[in-house]
Amino acid sequence: MTSTTASAPGNPTPAGPDAGPRPARAFAGPSLLRLTGVELRKLADTRAGFWLLVTIALGTAVLAAVQLIWAPDAEQTFGSFFTASLLPVGLLLPVLGILSITAEWSQRTALTTFALVPRRERVIVAKLAALVLAAAASTLTSLATAAAGTAIAGATGGAGTWRIEGALILHATVLQVTNVLMGAGFGLLLLNTPLAIVSYLLLPTLWSVLGEMIRPLRGPAGWLDTGRTMEPLFTPDVTGEQWARLGVSLLVWMVLPLVAGLVRTMRREAA
Amino acid sequence: MVDRAATAGRCRPPGGAGSLEHMISVEHLTKRYGRHTAVDDVSFHCEPGTVTGFLGPNGAGKSTTMRMICGLTPPSVGAATVLGRPYRQLPNPGREVGVLLDASAQHAGRTGREALTVAAATMGVGRREVAVKLEQVGLTGTAAKRRVRAYSLGMRQRLGLAHALLGDPRVLILDEPANGLDPEGIFWMRGLLRDFADRGGTVLLSSHLLREVEAVADRLVVIGGGRIVAQGGKDELLAGDRTLVRARDAAALRRALAAAGLAASDGTDGSLLVPATAETVGQAAADAGVPLSELRPAEGGGLEQLFLSLTTNSIPQEAAR
Protein backbone atom coordinates (compact mmCIF):
# COMPACT_ATOMS: atom_id res chain seq x y z
CA MET A 1 0.00 0.00 0.00
CA THR A 2 2.84 2.33 0.86
CA SER A 3 4.40 2.16 -2.55
CA THR A 4 1.03 2.89 -4.13
CA THR A 5 0.77 6.05 -2.07
CA ALA A 6 4.32 7.03 -2.85
CA SER A 7 3.68 6.76 -6.55
CA ALA A 8 0.35 8.55 -6.61
CA PRO A 9 -0.06 10.85 -9.61
CA GLY A 10 0.58 14.01 -7.58
CA ASN A 11 4.10 13.00 -6.65
CA PRO A 12 6.66 13.54 -9.35
CA THR A 13 8.87 10.57 -10.09
CA PRO A 14 12.61 10.93 -9.80
CA ALA A 15 12.72 10.43 -13.55
CA GLY A 16 11.39 13.81 -14.55
CA PRO A 17 10.23 17.23 -13.44
CA ASP A 18 6.55 16.60 -14.07
CA ALA A 19 4.81 13.31 -13.46
CA GLY A 20 5.35 12.39 -17.10
CA PRO A 21 4.40 8.93 -18.13
CA ARG A 22 2.74 7.84 -14.94
CA PRO A 23 4.56 5.91 -12.27
CA ALA A 24 3.63 2.33 -11.48
CA ARG A 25 0.23 1.58 -10.01
CA ALA A 26 -1.90 -1.49 -9.94
CA PHE A 27 -4.75 -1.19 -12.38
CA ALA A 28 -7.75 -3.42 -12.01
CA GLY A 29 -9.04 -5.03 -15.15
CA PRO A 30 -12.45 -4.10 -16.53
CA SER A 31 -15.36 -5.93 -14.90
CA LEU A 32 -17.71 -8.05 -17.01
CA LEU A 33 -20.42 -5.50 -16.29
CA ARG A 34 -18.31 -2.71 -17.76
CA LEU A 35 -17.38 -4.81 -20.77
CA THR A 36 -21.04 -5.64 -21.35
CA GLY A 37 -21.83 -1.93 -21.27
CA VAL A 38 -19.09 -1.30 -23.82
CA GLU A 39 -20.38 -4.08 -26.07
CA LEU A 40 -23.94 -2.74 -25.84
CA ARG A 41 -22.61 0.63 -26.93
CA LYS A 42 -20.74 -0.98 -29.81
CA LEU A 43 -23.98 -2.53 -31.08
CA ALA A 44 -25.36 0.91 -31.82
CA ASP A 45 -22.41 3.27 -32.36
CA THR A 46 -21.55 2.31 -35.93
CA ARG A 47 -23.54 3.28 -38.96
CA ALA A 48 -24.34 -0.35 -39.83
CA GLY A 49 -25.32 -1.24 -36.27
CA PHE A 50 -27.49 1.83 -35.83
CA TRP A 51 -29.45 1.25 -39.02
CA LEU A 52 -29.85 -2.44 -38.28
CA LEU A 53 -31.51 -1.55 -34.96
CA VAL A 54 -33.70 1.04 -36.71
CA THR A 55 -34.65 -1.54 -39.34
CA ILE A 56 -35.63 -4.04 -36.66
CA ALA A 57 -37.89 -1.47 -35.00
CA LEU A 58 -39.33 -0.40 -38.35
CA GLY A 59 -39.92 -4.05 -39.29
CA THR A 60 -42.26 -4.53 -36.36
CA ALA A 61 -44.10 -1.32 -37.25
CA VAL A 62 -44.50 -2.38 -40.89
CA LEU A 63 -45.92 -5.75 -39.89
CA ALA A 64 -48.38 -4.08 -37.52
CA ALA A 65 -49.48 -1.76 -40.33
CA VAL A 66 -49.93 -4.72 -42.71
CA GLN A 67 -52.13 -6.42 -40.15
CA LEU A 68 -54.16 -3.27 -39.55
CA ILE A 69 -54.92 -2.98 -43.25
CA TRP A 70 -55.38 -6.57 -44.38
CA ALA A 71 -55.98 -8.85 -41.38
CA PRO A 72 -59.62 -9.70 -40.55
CA ASP A 73 -60.99 -7.47 -37.80
CA ALA A 74 -61.37 -10.38 -35.40
CA GLU A 75 -57.62 -11.12 -35.62
CA GLN A 76 -56.54 -7.59 -34.75
CA THR A 77 -55.73 -8.46 -31.14
CA PHE A 78 -52.79 -7.63 -28.91
CA GLY A 79 -51.69 -11.25 -29.03
CA SER A 80 -51.66 -11.52 -32.78
CA PHE A 81 -49.94 -8.15 -33.25
CA PHE A 82 -47.28 -9.33 -30.81
CA THR A 83 -46.81 -12.72 -32.46
CA ALA A 84 -46.53 -11.19 -35.93
CA SER A 85 -43.90 -8.68 -34.82
CA LEU A 86 -41.69 -11.56 -33.67
CA LEU A 87 -41.02 -12.59 -37.26
CA PRO A 88 -39.06 -9.61 -38.63
CA VAL A 89 -37.20 -9.27 -35.33
CA GLY A 90 -36.35 -12.95 -35.28
CA LEU A 91 -35.00 -12.66 -38.80
CA LEU A 92 -32.78 -9.64 -38.14
CA LEU A 93 -31.56 -10.31 -34.59
CA PRO A 94 -29.23 -13.11 -35.77
CA VAL A 95 -27.66 -10.62 -38.17
CA LEU A 96 -27.03 -8.33 -35.21
CA GLY A 97 -25.46 -11.29 -33.41
CA ILE A 98 -23.29 -12.15 -36.39
CA LEU A 99 -22.18 -8.57 -37.01
CA SER A 100 -21.25 -7.90 -33.40
CA ILE A 101 -18.78 -10.79 -33.59
CA THR A 102 -17.53 -10.70 -37.17
CA ALA A 103 -17.12 -6.91 -37.40
CA GLU A 104 -14.19 -7.24 -34.99
CA TRP A 105 -12.42 -9.25 -37.66
CA SER A 106 -13.69 -7.69 -40.87
CA GLN A 107 -13.08 -4.18 -39.53
CA ARG A 108 -9.90 -5.44 -37.85
CA THR A 109 -10.88 -3.94 -34.52
CA ALA A 110 -9.96 -7.29 -32.93
CA LEU A 111 -6.43 -5.90 -32.90
CA THR A 112 -7.39 -3.00 -30.61
CA THR A 113 -10.11 -4.84 -28.68
CA PHE A 114 -7.87 -7.75 -27.70
CA ALA A 115 -4.90 -5.48 -27.04
CA LEU A 116 -7.04 -3.72 -24.41
CA VAL A 117 -8.61 -6.95 -23.09
CA PRO A 118 -6.19 -9.83 -23.75
CA ARG A 119 -8.51 -12.26 -22.01
CA ARG A 120 -10.62 -12.75 -25.10
CA GLU A 121 -13.19 -14.99 -23.44
CA ARG A 122 -14.27 -12.01 -21.34
CA VAL A 123 -14.91 -9.95 -24.45
CA ILE A 124 -16.94 -12.79 -25.96
CA VAL A 125 -18.97 -13.34 -22.79
CA ALA A 126 -19.66 -9.59 -22.64
CA LYS A 127 -20.75 -9.63 -26.28
CA LEU A 128 -23.14 -12.52 -25.66
CA ALA A 129 -24.52 -10.78 -22.57
CA ALA A 130 -25.08 -7.58 -24.58
CA LEU A 131 -26.84 -9.57 -27.30
CA VAL A 132 -29.11 -11.32 -24.78
CA LEU A 133 -30.04 -7.92 -23.35
CA ALA A 134 -30.71 -6.61 -26.86
CA ALA A 135 -32.92 -9.63 -27.61
CA ALA A 136 -34.83 -9.14 -24.38
CA ALA A 137 -35.27 -5.46 -25.24
CA SER A 138 -36.61 -6.49 -28.65
CA THR A 139 -39.50 -8.24 -26.85
CA LEU A 140 -40.30 -4.90 -25.24
CA THR A 141 -40.27 -3.29 -28.69
CA SER A 142 -42.64 -5.99 -29.93
CA LEU A 143 -44.92 -5.35 -26.95
CA ALA A 144 -44.88 -1.61 -27.62
CA THR A 145 -45.66 -2.07 -31.32
CA ALA A 146 -48.42 -4.53 -30.46
CA ALA A 147 -49.87 -2.04 -27.99
CA ALA A 148 -49.87 0.72 -30.60
CA GLY A 149 -51.43 -1.65 -33.15
CA THR A 150 -54.13 -2.77 -30.71
CA ALA A 151 -55.00 0.81 -29.80
CA ILE A 152 -55.33 1.80 -33.46
CA ALA A 153 -57.31 -1.40 -34.20
CA GLY A 154 -59.68 -0.57 -31.36
CA ALA A 155 -60.28 2.87 -32.85
CA THR A 156 -60.67 1.63 -36.45
CA GLY A 157 -63.10 -1.22 -35.91
CA GLY A 158 -60.69 -4.11 -35.27
CA ALA A 159 -61.11 -6.47 -32.34
CA GLY A 160 -58.61 -4.55 -30.25
CA THR A 161 -58.58 -7.21 -27.56
CA TRP A 162 -55.83 -6.62 -25.00
CA ARG A 163 -55.64 -10.08 -23.45
CA ILE A 164 -52.24 -11.80 -23.74
CA GLU A 165 -50.84 -14.82 -21.93
CA GLY A 166 -47.71 -14.24 -19.90
CA ALA A 167 -46.31 -17.54 -21.18
CA LEU A 168 -46.36 -16.18 -24.73
CA ILE A 169 -44.18 -13.24 -23.74
CA LEU A 170 -41.78 -15.60 -21.99
CA HIS A 171 -41.65 -17.91 -25.01
CA ALA A 172 -41.12 -14.96 -27.33
CA THR A 173 -38.17 -13.85 -25.21
CA VAL A 174 -36.68 -17.34 -25.34
CA LEU A 175 -37.21 -17.32 -29.11
CA GLN A 176 -35.40 -14.03 -29.65
CA VAL A 177 -32.57 -14.83 -27.25
CA THR A 178 -31.93 -18.15 -28.98
CA ASN A 179 -32.18 -16.44 -32.38
CA VAL A 180 -29.53 -13.88 -31.50
CA LEU A 181 -27.27 -16.46 -29.86
CA MET A 182 -27.53 -18.76 -32.87
CA GLY A 183 -26.37 -15.85 -35.01
CA ALA A 184 -23.52 -15.14 -32.60
CA GLY A 185 -22.54 -18.80 -32.72
CA PHE A 186 -22.31 -18.75 -36.50
CA GLY A 187 -20.35 -15.50 -36.32
CA LEU A 188 -17.91 -16.91 -33.75
CA LEU A 189 -17.40 -20.09 -35.70
CA LEU A 190 -16.92 -18.54 -39.14
CA LEU A 191 -15.50 -15.11 -38.17
CA ASN A 192 -16.52 -13.68 -41.52
CA THR A 193 -19.64 -11.58 -42.06
CA PRO A 194 -20.98 -12.71 -45.45
CA LEU A 195 -20.04 -16.33 -44.85
CA ALA A 196 -21.76 -16.35 -41.46
CA ILE A 197 -24.93 -14.64 -42.70
CA VAL A 198 -25.28 -16.89 -45.74
CA SER A 199 -24.57 -20.05 -43.73
CA TYR A 200 -26.99 -18.99 -41.04
CA LEU A 201 -29.78 -18.40 -43.55
CA LEU A 202 -28.97 -21.32 -45.81
CA LEU A 203 -27.94 -24.27 -43.65
CA PRO A 204 -31.08 -24.61 -41.48
CA THR A 205 -33.29 -24.05 -44.54
CA LEU A 206 -31.36 -26.63 -46.51
CA TRP A 207 -31.74 -29.00 -43.59
CA SER A 208 -35.51 -28.32 -43.52
CA VAL A 209 -35.85 -29.01 -47.21
CA LEU A 210 -33.79 -32.20 -47.01
CA GLY A 211 -35.73 -33.28 -43.94
CA GLU A 212 -38.94 -32.95 -45.92
CA MET A 213 -37.62 -34.68 -49.01
CA ILE A 214 -35.68 -37.59 -47.58
CA ARG A 215 -37.92 -40.00 -45.71
CA PRO A 216 -35.33 -41.41 -43.23
CA LEU A 217 -34.43 -37.85 -42.24
CA ARG A 218 -37.94 -36.95 -41.16
CA GLY A 219 -37.56 -38.44 -37.70
CA PRO A 220 -34.29 -36.66 -36.82
CA ALA A 221 -35.51 -33.46 -38.49
CA GLY A 222 -38.20 -33.20 -35.85
CA TRP A 223 -35.39 -32.91 -33.32
CA LEU A 224 -32.82 -30.97 -35.32
CA ASP A 225 -34.68 -28.60 -37.64
CA THR A 226 -34.88 -25.33 -35.72
CA GLY A 227 -37.54 -24.08 -38.13
CA ARG A 228 -39.80 -26.77 -36.72
CA THR A 229 -38.59 -26.99 -33.13
CA MET A 230 -38.88 -23.23 -32.57
CA GLU A 231 -42.41 -23.01 -33.96
CA PRO A 232 -44.14 -23.78 -30.62
CA LEU A 233 -42.46 -20.70 -29.13
CA PHE A 234 -44.88 -18.54 -31.10
CA THR A 235 -47.66 -19.93 -28.92
CA PRO A 236 -48.35 -19.78 -25.19
CA ASP A 237 -48.37 -23.58 -24.93
CA VAL A 238 -45.16 -25.57 -25.23
CA THR A 239 -45.20 -29.23 -24.15
CA GLY A 240 -42.40 -31.03 -22.40
CA GLU A 241 -41.53 -32.94 -25.55
CA GLN A 242 -41.45 -29.73 -27.56
CA TRP A 243 -39.00 -28.23 -25.06
CA ALA A 244 -36.89 -31.37 -25.40
CA ARG A 245 -36.89 -31.14 -29.20
CA LEU A 246 -36.02 -27.44 -28.97
CA GLY A 247 -33.21 -28.20 -26.55
CA VAL A 248 -31.69 -30.85 -28.79
CA SER A 249 -31.87 -28.69 -31.91
CA LEU A 250 -30.32 -25.76 -30.06
CA LEU A 251 -27.55 -27.96 -28.79
CA VAL A 252 -26.57 -28.55 -32.40
CA TRP A 253 -27.26 -25.13 -33.93
CA MET A 254 -26.47 -22.83 -30.99
CA VAL A 255 -24.34 -24.44 -28.27
CA LEU A 256 -22.01 -26.33 -30.58
CA PRO A 257 -21.16 -23.30 -32.78
CA LEU A 258 -20.77 -21.11 -29.68
CA VAL A 259 -18.33 -23.50 -28.02
CA ALA A 260 -16.37 -24.34 -31.17
CA GLY A 261 -16.37 -20.65 -32.13
CA LEU A 262 -15.09 -19.60 -28.71
CA VAL A 263 -12.22 -22.06 -29.03
CA ARG A 264 -11.45 -20.74 -32.51
CA THR A 265 -11.57 -17.11 -31.39
CA MET A 266 -9.28 -17.82 -28.45
CA ARG A 267 -6.69 -19.36 -30.72
CA ARG A 268 -6.94 -17.13 -33.73
CA GLU A 269 -4.17 -14.72 -34.40
CA ALA A 270 -5.37 -11.12 -34.28
CA ALA A 271 -3.80 -9.29 -37.17
CA MET B 1 -0.86 -16.69 -10.50
CA VAL B 2 -3.27 -14.63 -8.46
CA ASP B 3 -0.87 -13.90 -5.65
CA ARG B 4 1.95 -13.29 -8.08
CA ALA B 5 -0.15 -10.64 -9.75
CA ALA B 6 -0.99 -9.07 -6.42
CA THR B 7 2.65 -8.99 -5.36
CA ALA B 8 3.77 -7.47 -8.61
CA GLY B 9 1.14 -4.77 -8.30
CA ARG B 10 2.09 -3.89 -4.76
CA CYS B 11 5.83 -4.03 -4.95
CA ARG B 12 6.34 -2.48 -8.34
CA PRO B 13 8.95 0.24 -7.86
CA PRO B 14 7.96 3.65 -9.19
CA GLY B 15 11.10 4.42 -11.15
CA GLY B 16 11.40 1.07 -12.81
CA ALA B 17 14.38 -0.38 -10.98
CA GLY B 18 15.37 -3.98 -10.39
CA SER B 19 13.65 -6.53 -12.53
CA LEU B 20 11.78 -3.77 -14.33
CA GLU B 21 14.95 -2.37 -15.84
CA HIS B 22 13.66 -3.97 -19.01
CA MET B 23 10.28 -2.41 -19.70
CA ILE B 24 10.00 -4.62 -22.75
CA SER B 25 11.88 -7.86 -22.84
CA VAL B 26 11.91 -10.10 -25.89
CA GLU B 27 13.57 -13.50 -25.53
CA HIS B 28 14.18 -15.79 -28.51
CA LEU B 29 10.86 -15.00 -30.15
CA THR B 30 10.23 -17.22 -33.14
CA LYS B 31 7.15 -17.48 -35.30
CA ARG B 32 6.67 -20.09 -37.99
CA TYR B 33 3.82 -20.21 -40.44
CA GLY B 34 4.01 -23.68 -41.92
CA ARG B 35 7.49 -23.90 -43.38
CA HIS B 36 7.96 -20.15 -43.51
CA THR B 37 9.75 -18.62 -40.54
CA ALA B 38 8.51 -15.06 -40.20
CA VAL B 39 10.45 -14.29 -37.03
CA ASP B 40 13.58 -16.19 -36.15
CA ASP B 41 15.07 -16.12 -32.64
CA VAL B 42 14.62 -12.41 -31.97
CA SER B 43 15.82 -11.06 -28.61
CA PHE B 44 16.10 -7.47 -27.41
CA HIS B 45 15.25 -5.24 -24.48
CA CYS B 46 13.90 -1.74 -24.06
CA GLU B 47 14.87 0.38 -21.08
CA PRO B 48 12.93 3.24 -19.49
CA GLY B 49 13.74 6.67 -20.85
CA THR B 50 14.70 5.38 -24.28
CA VAL B 51 13.27 5.24 -27.76
CA THR B 52 14.11 2.01 -29.53
CA GLY B 53 13.85 2.04 -33.29
CA PHE B 54 12.81 -1.33 -34.70
CA LEU B 55 14.07 -1.21 -38.24
CA GLY B 56 13.66 -3.49 -41.15
CA PRO B 57 12.34 -3.69 -44.69
CA ASN B 58 8.72 -4.57 -45.31
CA GLY B 59 8.03 -8.19 -44.48
CA ALA B 60 11.08 -8.51 -42.23
CA GLY B 61 8.97 -9.63 -39.26
CA LYS B 62 8.58 -6.34 -37.37
CA SER B 63 4.80 -6.43 -37.13
CA THR B 64 4.71 -10.12 -36.25
CA THR B 65 7.24 -9.51 -33.47
CA MET B 66 5.20 -6.60 -32.12
CA ARG B 67 1.99 -8.61 -32.23
CA MET B 68 3.73 -11.38 -30.29
CA ILE B 69 4.87 -8.84 -27.67
CA CYS B 70 1.26 -7.71 -27.31
CA GLY B 71 -0.12 -11.22 -26.93
CA LEU B 72 -2.08 -11.07 -30.17
CA THR B 73 -0.03 -13.72 -31.95
CA PRO B 74 1.13 -16.79 -30.07
CA PRO B 75 4.88 -17.32 -30.61
CA SER B 76 6.14 -20.70 -31.82
CA VAL B 77 9.16 -20.39 -29.54
CA GLY B 78 10.27 -17.83 -26.98
CA ALA B 79 8.47 -15.29 -24.86
CA ALA B 80 8.10 -11.57 -24.31
CA THR B 81 7.30 -9.55 -21.23
CA VAL B 82 6.15 -5.99 -20.82
CA LEU B 83 6.71 -4.38 -17.42
CA GLY B 84 8.02 -7.71 -16.22
CA ARG B 85 4.95 -9.71 -17.16
CA PRO B 86 3.60 -11.46 -20.22
CA TYR B 87 1.29 -8.93 -21.90
CA ARG B 88 -1.71 -11.20 -21.53
CA GLN B 89 -1.27 -11.17 -17.76
CA LEU B 90 -1.52 -7.40 -17.47
CA PRO B 91 -4.94 -6.87 -15.87
CA ASN B 92 -5.63 -3.60 -17.67
CA PRO B 93 -2.93 -3.30 -20.35
CA GLY B 94 -4.29 -0.07 -21.83
CA ARG B 95 -3.31 1.80 -18.65
CA GLU B 96 0.28 0.61 -18.82
CA VAL B 97 1.11 0.00 -22.47
CA GLY B 98 -0.04 2.15 -25.35
CA VAL B 99 -0.32 0.06 -28.47
CA LEU B 100 -0.67 1.17 -32.08
CA LEU B 101 -0.21 -1.81 -34.36
CA ASP B 102 -2.27 -0.73 -37.34
CA ALA B 103 -3.85 2.65 -37.81
CA SER B 104 -6.47 1.11 -40.08
CA ALA B 105 -7.66 -1.31 -37.42
CA GLN B 106 -10.60 0.88 -36.45
CA HIS B 107 -14.23 0.38 -37.38
CA ALA B 108 -14.83 2.50 -40.48
CA GLY B 109 -18.37 3.27 -39.40
CA ARG B 110 -17.40 4.71 -36.03
CA THR B 111 -16.43 8.34 -35.51
CA GLY B 112 -12.95 9.08 -34.25
CA ARG B 113 -14.30 10.39 -30.97
CA GLU B 114 -16.51 7.30 -30.55
CA ALA B 115 -13.58 4.94 -31.17
CA LEU B 116 -11.71 6.62 -28.32
CA THR B 117 -14.80 6.73 -26.11
CA VAL B 118 -15.21 2.97 -26.45
CA ALA B 119 -11.55 2.43 -25.57
CA ALA B 120 -11.80 4.83 -22.62
CA ALA B 121 -14.86 2.98 -21.32
CA THR B 122 -13.02 -0.33 -21.63
CA MET B 123 -9.98 0.93 -19.72
CA GLY B 124 -11.98 2.87 -17.18
CA VAL B 125 -10.50 6.20 -18.22
CA GLY B 126 -12.64 9.31 -17.83
CA ARG B 127 -14.47 10.75 -20.83
CA ARG B 128 -12.59 14.01 -20.41
CA GLU B 129 -9.37 12.25 -21.41
CA VAL B 130 -10.88 11.55 -24.84
CA ALA B 131 -11.12 15.25 -25.60
CA VAL B 132 -7.67 15.90 -24.13
CA LYS B 133 -6.01 13.23 -26.27
CA LEU B 134 -7.88 14.24 -29.42
CA GLU B 135 -6.66 17.77 -28.85
CA GLN B 136 -3.13 16.53 -28.26
CA VAL B 137 -2.95 14.80 -31.63
CA GLY B 138 -4.69 17.60 -33.45
CA LEU B 139 -7.99 15.87 -34.20
CA THR B 140 -10.45 18.45 -33.06
CA GLY B 141 -13.79 19.87 -34.09
CA THR B 142 -15.27 18.29 -37.19
CA ALA B 143 -12.36 15.85 -37.64
CA ALA B 144 -13.24 14.07 -34.39
CA LYS B 145 -16.89 13.82 -35.39
CA ARG B 146 -16.21 12.32 -38.79
CA ARG B 147 -16.35 8.58 -39.34
CA VAL B 148 -13.01 6.80 -39.61
CA ARG B 149 -13.99 5.77 -43.16
CA ALA B 150 -13.45 9.38 -44.21
CA TYR B 151 -10.05 9.66 -42.50
CA SER B 152 -6.81 9.91 -44.41
CA LEU B 153 -4.02 7.55 -43.35
CA GLY B 154 -2.37 10.45 -41.55
CA MET B 155 -5.55 11.14 -39.56
CA ARG B 156 -5.85 7.45 -38.73
CA GLN B 157 -2.29 7.49 -37.43
CA ARG B 158 -3.12 10.48 -35.25
CA LEU B 159 -6.23 8.73 -33.96
CA GLY B 160 -4.19 5.59 -33.31
CA LEU B 161 -1.62 7.62 -31.40
CA ALA B 162 -4.38 9.25 -29.32
CA HIS B 163 -5.69 5.74 -28.68
CA ALA B 164 -2.26 4.57 -27.54
CA LEU B 165 -1.82 7.59 -25.25
CA LEU B 166 -5.35 7.40 -23.83
CA GLY B 167 -4.53 5.35 -20.73
CA ASP B 168 -1.45 7.46 -19.90
CA PRO B 169 0.82 4.43 -20.28
CA ARG B 170 4.50 4.13 -19.40
CA VAL B 171 5.33 2.10 -22.48
CA LEU B 172 4.45 2.79 -26.11
CA ILE B 173 4.56 0.11 -28.80
CA LEU B 174 4.01 1.67 -32.22
CA ASP B 175 4.15 -0.08 -35.58
CA GLU B 176 5.06 2.27 -38.43
CA PRO B 177 3.40 5.27 -36.78
CA ALA B 178 4.92 7.72 -39.27
CA ASN B 179 3.29 6.06 -42.27
CA GLY B 180 0.99 8.50 -43.99
CA LEU B 181 2.01 11.47 -41.85
CA ASP B 182 3.15 14.57 -43.68
CA PRO B 183 6.64 15.95 -42.90
CA GLU B 184 5.18 18.32 -40.34
CA GLY B 185 3.30 15.43 -38.73
CA ILE B 186 6.45 13.33 -38.59
CA PHE B 187 8.32 16.20 -36.95
CA TRP B 188 5.51 16.62 -34.43
CA MET B 189 5.44 12.90 -33.64
CA ARG B 190 9.20 12.81 -33.09
CA GLY B 191 8.86 15.60 -30.54
CA LEU B 192 6.03 13.79 -28.81
CA LEU B 193 7.91 10.49 -28.58
CA ARG B 194 11.17 12.15 -27.52
CA ASP B 195 9.32 14.02 -24.81
CA PHE B 196 7.58 10.82 -23.70
CA ALA B 197 10.92 9.05 -23.34
CA ASP B 198 12.62 12.02 -21.71
CA ARG B 199 10.01 11.90 -18.99
CA GLY B 200 10.93 8.30 -18.22
CA GLY B 201 8.68 6.48 -20.69
CA THR B 202 9.74 3.63 -22.94
CA VAL B 203 9.08 3.68 -26.67
CA LEU B 204 9.42 0.88 -29.18
CA LEU B 205 8.64 2.06 -32.69
CA SER B 206 9.11 0.29 -35.96
CA SER B 207 9.87 1.69 -39.36
CA HIS B 208 11.12 0.57 -42.72
CA LEU B 209 12.91 3.90 -43.20
CA LEU B 210 16.24 4.40 -41.49
CA ARG B 211 16.04 8.20 -41.73
CA GLU B 212 12.66 8.22 -40.05
CA VAL B 213 13.80 6.69 -36.77
CA GLU B 214 17.37 7.97 -36.87
CA ALA B 215 16.23 11.38 -35.64
CA VAL B 216 14.41 10.13 -32.57
CA ALA B 217 15.77 6.72 -31.54
CA ASP B 218 18.46 6.11 -28.92
CA ARG B 219 18.82 2.46 -29.77
CA LEU B 220 18.29 0.55 -32.95
CA VAL B 221 17.28 -3.04 -33.52
CA VAL B 222 17.65 -3.98 -37.16
CA ILE B 223 15.79 -7.01 -38.45
CA GLY B 224 15.90 -8.65 -41.87
CA GLY B 225 14.32 -11.87 -43.02
CA GLY B 226 13.04 -12.48 -39.48
CA ARG B 227 16.47 -12.30 -37.88
CA ILE B 228 18.19 -9.54 -35.98
CA VAL B 229 21.14 -8.36 -38.04
CA ALA B 230 22.30 -5.51 -35.84
CA GLN B 231 21.39 -3.88 -32.56
CA GLY B 232 22.92 -1.33 -30.28
CA GLY B 233 23.15 2.36 -29.53
CA LYS B 234 22.28 4.54 -32.49
CA ASP B 235 25.56 6.43 -32.40
CA GLU B 236 27.75 3.36 -32.39
CA LEU B 237 25.71 1.73 -35.14
CA LEU B 238 25.58 4.79 -37.33
CA ALA B 239 29.10 6.09 -36.84
CA GLY B 240 31.03 3.03 -37.83
CA ASP B 241 34.64 3.78 -38.75
CA ARG B 242 34.08 5.26 -42.15
CA THR B 243 35.26 8.65 -43.21
CA LEU B 244 34.19 10.70 -46.17
CA VAL B 245 37.03 12.65 -47.68
CA ARG B 246 37.26 14.93 -50.69
CA ALA B 247 40.05 16.82 -52.39
CA ARG B 248 40.20 18.97 -55.49
CA ASP B 249 42.94 16.67 -56.79
CA ALA B 250 41.21 13.31 -56.39
CA ALA B 251 44.04 11.37 -57.99
CA ALA B 252 46.60 12.81 -55.56
CA LEU B 253 44.30 11.96 -52.66
CA ARG B 254 43.94 8.41 -53.89
CA ARG B 255 47.75 8.06 -54.08
CA ALA B 256 48.15 9.56 -50.61
CA LEU B 257 45.64 7.09 -49.13
CA ALA B 258 47.22 4.17 -50.93
CA ALA B 259 50.64 5.24 -49.63
CA ALA B 260 49.22 5.18 -46.08
CA GLY B 261 47.80 1.70 -46.71
CA LEU B 262 44.19 2.86 -46.65
CA ALA B 263 41.60 1.34 -48.98
CA ALA B 264 39.28 3.87 -50.53
CA SER B 265 36.03 3.39 -52.37
CA ASP B 266 34.20 5.92 -54.50
CA GLY B 267 31.50 7.84 -52.74
CA THR B 268 28.96 10.02 -54.45
CA ASP B 269 30.00 13.12 -56.41
CA GLY B 270 33.74 12.55 -56.36
CA SER B 271 34.23 11.98 -52.66
CA LEU B 272 36.02 8.92 -51.29
CA LEU B 273 34.87 6.64 -48.49
CA VAL B 274 37.64 5.28 -46.30
CA PRO B 275 37.19 2.64 -43.59
CA ALA B 276 39.27 4.56 -41.03
CA THR B 277 38.82 7.42 -38.59
CA ALA B 278 38.87 11.01 -39.82
CA GLU B 279 42.10 11.56 -37.89
CA THR B 280 43.94 8.77 -39.72
CA VAL B 281 42.68 9.93 -43.09
CA GLY B 282 43.56 13.57 -42.38
CA GLN B 283 47.05 12.55 -41.26
CA ALA B 284 47.57 10.54 -44.45
CA ALA B 285 46.55 13.52 -46.59
CA ALA B 286 48.72 15.92 -44.60
CA ASP B 287 51.73 13.60 -44.88
CA ALA B 288 51.34 13.63 -48.65
CA GLY B 289 50.64 17.36 -48.73
CA VAL B 290 47.23 16.98 -50.38
CA PRO B 291 44.86 19.84 -49.48
CA LEU B 292 41.40 18.56 -48.55
CA SER B 293 38.10 20.25 -49.32
CA GLU B 294 36.04 17.98 -47.04
CA LEU B 295 36.73 15.55 -44.21
CA ARG B 296 34.02 14.07 -41.99
CA PRO B 297 32.70 10.80 -40.54
CA ALA B 298 30.45 9.12 -43.10
CA GLU B 299 27.17 9.07 -41.22
CA GLY B 300 25.12 5.93 -41.34
CA GLY B 301 27.30 4.59 -44.07
CA GLY B 302 27.65 1.09 -42.70
CA LEU B 303 24.13 0.80 -41.47
CA GLU B 304 22.70 2.27 -44.59
CA GLN B 305 24.60 -0.24 -46.72
CA LEU B 306 23.45 -3.06 -44.48
CA PHE B 307 19.92 -1.79 -44.69
CA LEU B 308 20.07 -1.52 -48.44
CA SER B 309 21.34 -5.07 -48.78
CA LEU B 310 18.54 -6.28 -46.52
CA THR B 311 15.96 -4.57 -48.66
CA THR B 312 17.25 -6.10 -51.85
CA ASN B 313 17.67 -9.55 -50.35
CA SER B 314 14.33 -9.77 -48.66
CA ILE B 315 12.09 -8.96 -51.57
CA PRO B 316 11.75 -12.52 -52.84
CA GLN B 317 11.24 -13.77 -49.28
CA GLU B 318 8.50 -11.33 -48.55
CA ALA B 319 5.58 -13.62 -48.07
CA ALA B 320 2.02 -12.95 -47.12
CA ARG B 321 1.45 -14.10 -43.62
Image (cartoon, coloured by chain):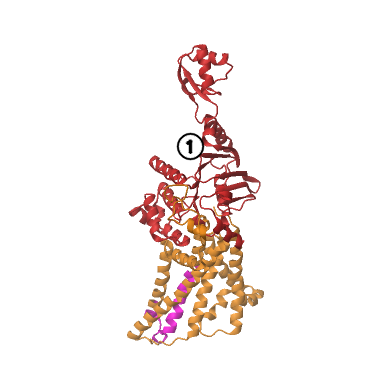
Chain colours: A orange, B red
Which is more toward the observer, B297 or A152?
A: B297
Instruction: Report the number of numbered marks.
Output: 1
Q: In this orientation, does residue A245 appear?
A: yes
Above or below for A84 versus B153 = below
Q: Start and end of the magenta stretch?
A: A66-95
Q: In this orientation, does residue A193 appear?
A: no
Amino acid type, label 1:
Glu
Residue drawn at 40 percent across, 68 percent down: A54
> Quadrant location of residue A140?
bottom left
Main secondary structure type of the part rendered in magenta: helix
Seen in the image, is A211 located left or right of residue B148?
right
> Quadrant location of residue B307?
top right
Mark 1 lies on a secondary structure that is helix
Residue beneath disc 1: B214
Above or below for A163 versus B37 = below
Q: Position of residue B226 (x, y in %)?
A: 60, 42
Q: Position of residue B14 (x, y in %)?
A: 51, 52
Seen in the image, is B112 located left or right of residue A209?
left
Q: Position of residue A22 (x, y in %)?
A: 46, 53
Mark 1 Cα within 10 Å, few/some/many (few <14, many 20+)?
some
